[in-house]
């Protein structure tokens, strides 16, 4: 017969009661997906999140604003012409030297700047990513040839090359296609000087990835080159491409404004932020707000793109996604 002193020992020697599968799963917190962890890391970055919100608002204003705002962006009110007017209830941000509403022109200029930035980066990705993938994975003669083509373009200062292209072909395209033709030329010239850098980023990343064990294992098991690139390499390059494209948008916005400021982009009476700054320089002593408003919007866009790009770089860092 057991004594009371033996009960604790007996209790210790009993086999533990197995947990049910449901209890075990409930005890372990669910692991979030890589996408959820990346979004959480981005959302906790306050400058990046604020920059994304501001860019979304600017995009909304650029799309909806010209449809809602009653004033014209290319013509003055012939019944109440007020050149170089200060902000007032009739014209919330004032008028320019031709009596055209500045807010209306600013919303149209936003549409031009954001549209050029999006299309330049789209061409940048479509050109730079495939070339970087091919050069990095194939190596040898293909890598040498594609790298030399990129080096030729790198030999010219980027903005100067865009100015050269826009200056040479701008008048003829402007005659044929008008403002849309010049806008297409600005987009193409900026993409021409942007894709080599994207290609170099992707090439450097692919050179590292192709030596990893998971790629070597896929190659040894007979997986085709196309599938290795699409399934094993491309997903690991997406984060780099998104970050590089977002950061490059800041410089594209400034370059587009510079081309328009030099008279090589959109031409008056069509509006762009660069054109607005250019026309406002001559009337600074009369009404300095004409240059301040487009200058502030340009600075805000550049800062927001930079903040969002930095946030994406941190959020998509492989150490963050572990």
Image (spheres, grey):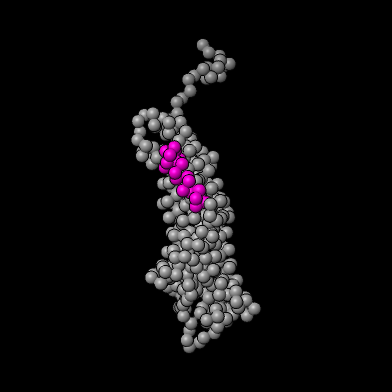
Q: Can I make out residue 90 in this image?
A: no
Residue that protrudes farthest toward the bottom in the picture: 79
Residue 283 locus on image (x, y percent): 60, 78
Residue that protrudes farthest toward the top in the picture: 1
In percent of the image, x 45 and y 26: which residue is there? 18
Foreground residue among 26 and 90: 90
Q: Can I make out residue 9 in this image?
A: yes
- Please give left or right for residue 4 compared with residue 114 in the image: right
In percent of the image, x 51 and y 17: which residue is there? 13
Q: What count of labels does the image hold? A: 0
In percent of the image, x 57 and y 81: which residue is there? 84
Foreground residue among 222 and 232: 222
Residue 291 locus on image (x, y percent): 59, 72
- Please give left or right for residue 258 compared with residue 238 in the image: right
Residue that protrudes farthest toward the right in the picture: 285
Question: In the image, is residue 100 part of the stretch drawn in magenta?
Answer: no
Question: In the image, is residue 139 part of the stretch drawn in magenta?
Answer: yes
Foreground residue among 25 and 116: 116
Residue 190, compared with residue 96, is above or below; it is: above
Residue 221: name its quadrant.
top left
Residue 117, compared with residue 207, is above or below; it is: below
Magenta part mainly helix, strand or loop? helix
In percent of the image, x 58 and y 67: which residue is there? 296
Q: Which residues, given as a range, are shown in magenta?
A: 134-154
Residue 120 locus on image (x, y percent): 45, 58
């Amino acid at each position: 017969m057991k004594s009371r002193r033996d009960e604790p020992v007996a209790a210790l020697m009993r086999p533990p009661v197995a947990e049910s599968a449901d209890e075990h799963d409930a005890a372990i917190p669910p692991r979030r997906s890589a996408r959820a962890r990346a979004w959480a890391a981005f959302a906790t970055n306050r400058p990046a999140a604020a920059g994304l919100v501001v860019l979304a608002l600017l995009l909304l204003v650029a799309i909806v604003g010209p449809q809602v705002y009653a004033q014209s962006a290319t013509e003055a009110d012939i019944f109440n012409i007020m050149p170089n007017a200060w902000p007032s209830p009739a014209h919330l941000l004032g008028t320019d030297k031709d009596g055209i509403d500045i807010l209306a022109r600013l919303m149209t200029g936003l549409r031009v700047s954001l549209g050029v930035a999006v299309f330049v980066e789209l061409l940048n990705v479509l050109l730079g990513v495939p070339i970087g993938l091919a050069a990095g994975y194939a190596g040898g003669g293909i890598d040498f040839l594609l790298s030399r083509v990129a080096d030729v373009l790198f030999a010219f200062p980027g903005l100067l090359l865009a100015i050269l292209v826009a200056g040479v072909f701008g008048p003829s395209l402007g005659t044929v296609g008008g403002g849309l033709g010049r806008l297409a030329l600005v987009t193409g010239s900026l993409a021409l000087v942007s894709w080599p850098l994207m290609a170099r980023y992707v090439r450097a990343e692919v050179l590292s990835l192709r030596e990893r064990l998971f790629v070597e294992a896929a190659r040894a098991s007979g997986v085709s080159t196309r599938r290795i690139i699409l399934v094993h390499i491309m997903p690991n390059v997406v984060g780099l491409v998104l970050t590089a494209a977002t950061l490059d948008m800041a410089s594209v916005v400034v370059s587009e404004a510079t081309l328009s400021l030099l008279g090589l982009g959109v031409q008056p009476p069509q509006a762009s932020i660069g054109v607005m700054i250019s026309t406002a320089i001559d009337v600074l002593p009369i009404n300095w707000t004409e240059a301040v408003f487009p200058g502030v919007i340009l600075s805000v866009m550049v800062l927001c793109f930079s903040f969002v790009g930095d946030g994406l770089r941190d959020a998509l860092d492989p150490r963050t996604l572990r």
